[in-house]
Amino acid sequence: MPYSVLIADDDHSLRSVLSSALKKAGYHTVKAQNGKEAIDCVRKDEFDVILLDIFLGDTDGLDLIESIQELNPTASIIIITGHGTTQTAIEASKRRAYWYLTKPIDLKRLLDLVSRAASASNQTKNVKASITSIDADGQGKMVGQSPAMQTVYQIIGRAAFSDETVLIMGESGTGKELVAELIHENSPRSDNPFVVVDCSAIPPTLIESTLFGHLKGAFTDAHIDRKGKFEQADSGTIFLDEIGELPIEIQMKLLRVLQEREIEPVGSSGTRPINVRIIAATNRQLDTAVAQKTFRDDLYYRLNVIPISLPPLRERKEDIPEMIDLFTSQFAQEYQLPKVGISSETIKELAEYPWPGNVRELENAIKRALVMCSGQMLLKEHFSQIFDKTPDNTLDNQDLDQQIFTLLQGEVACYLESDAETGELHATIRAIFEKPLFEIVLEHTEGNRSKASEILGINRNTLHTKLNEYDIK
Ligand SMILES: Nc1ncnc2c1ncn2[C@@H]1O[C@H](COP(=O)(O)OP(=O)(O)OP(=O)(O)O)[C@@H](O)[C@H]1O
Ligand SMILES: [Mg+2]
């Protein structure tokens, strides 16, 4: 069966020229002279490639993309226009057109493009597709129906109403903060503040005043009275993240707060009553820390009234497809992109990956794949950073910056290779990515320009010019 190409253009002579060139190359072609005809054709037949003019008589071709994709989800759409603007290029790529071409059309190049577009379409057709829906408002939602997660939901439900202290344990990226939020949102305190404190991110010398506040003059920089996190969380919930990192002297003070339900601001001689629900989280084995005497056992027992253990993602692989669905919908909405499908084969491969960074790593992988994907279907190749990784070279989730960085590097390589015809699209990519990329790289190299130009793969003079252009110091 020859590949089938729809040529939708209001220019009669161009339609004929393209059609005969494509026929000669062995394609089956159908012609449409306006938007209505194009939609009729797509409704009747399935095409591998659709050449779509933007100024299409009665319609704007860009507006047709979505309807075409709905009727014919595996077709690769190539946008053709006589009046290319940066905005059209952006729009075309946002709507997941396969490619964007400006007139006059170079036939040789077009044939080459059509052949690539046809095989991309064929690839997506051969795998069973499941198109995800984007209209569900998945923001902040917790998904997964595995038995382990069912247990977690039950405990969340009971914990929400009890007002007791909760200790959430789980590896990095398993959803500890999300669970804490859900408990708060479902509790009678939900109209009051939910205050997050990352105990690992505060310098030891500031922890006490951060948590409990201070009075003016309590220490050199204390120019005014300041409320601590506990008081900010009044009538609400405080989430003490990475509680295992709390210095031992502060552990004792926290224990007192838990027992007496009152705080003592730094520099004060009295105490203040507090009404705060406490949820703590840790990715360390606190019982081991207790055995090693780096964590107080009395505090551990006080915190561990309602324990919630979040299993690593590799132990609940059955949740992965639903998560993929949620994240693809969420990001499509966030970036205002059309819905994108994912092949069941790719889903299977993703479910087999061990996900050392758990849900967060999966979320980031999907985000990256959506940026890399120019068609309507996420394929294995869009997850190359995951699948091409050797087991001992796995990224932990602190490496997101590195990942974004690698992504941007790819974009730079892409525009550096640009030729005259695709220059416009690449200029767009460049405008979006280049300045932040240079800033990230320079920060990374601590201002060292030789290193930066090496990483970016451009020479020092070019870098110098660019930095001036973008006014980066
Ligand atoms: N079951 C789930 N369903 C949907 N999204 C989830 C689920 N679990 C986690 N996430 C998402 O994954 C990301 C990581 O979750 P979260 O920040 O709660 O993890 P964490 O355990 O606190 O990680 P860390 O230890 O690295 O702080 C968040 O964006 C969260 O919304
Ligand atoms: Mg967290």
Image: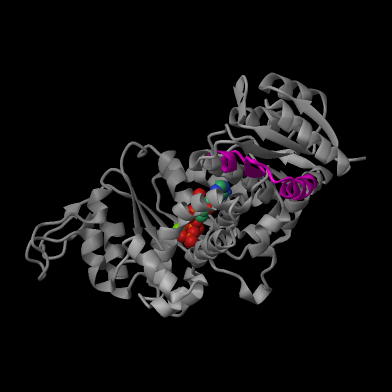
Residue 229 placement, left or right of 449: left
Residue 110 belongs to magenta span: yes
Residue at x-position 89% and y-position 42%: 26
Classify residue 403 as left or right of residue 303: right
Q: Could you say where residue 404 lies in the image, as x and y percent from the top left?
A: 51, 61
| Count of all numbered marks drawn on residues in the image | 0
Residue at the (64%, 47%) spot, across then down: 374
Which quarter of the picture shows residue 75? top right
Q: Position of residue 425 (x, y in %)?
A: 55, 49
Task: Report the front residue among 118 and 391.
Answer: 118
Looking at this view, is 128 or 84 the one in front?
84
- Vertical order, 469 against 321 (above or below): below
Q: The C terminus appears in which quarter of the rendering?
A: bottom left
Give the extent of the magenta segment. Answer: 91-118
Classify the position of the N terminus by image quarter.
top right
- In this picture, is 179 found above or below 173? above
Give the x, y percent position of residue 115.
79, 48
Whether residue 209 is visible? yes
Give the residue at the far right of this rendering.
1
Q: Is residue 11 above or below residue 20?
A: above
Q: Does the stretch in magenta take in 461?
A: no
Residue 249 is situated, as x and y percent measured from the top left of the image, at 28, 74
Residue visible at 22% across and 51% down in the picture = 231
Observer-nearest of 246 and 127: 127
Give the residue drawn at x 44%, y 42%.
160
Q: Is residue 293 visible?
A: no
Q: Indicate how the structure is coloured in the image.
A: one colour
**Above or below 255: residue 96:** above
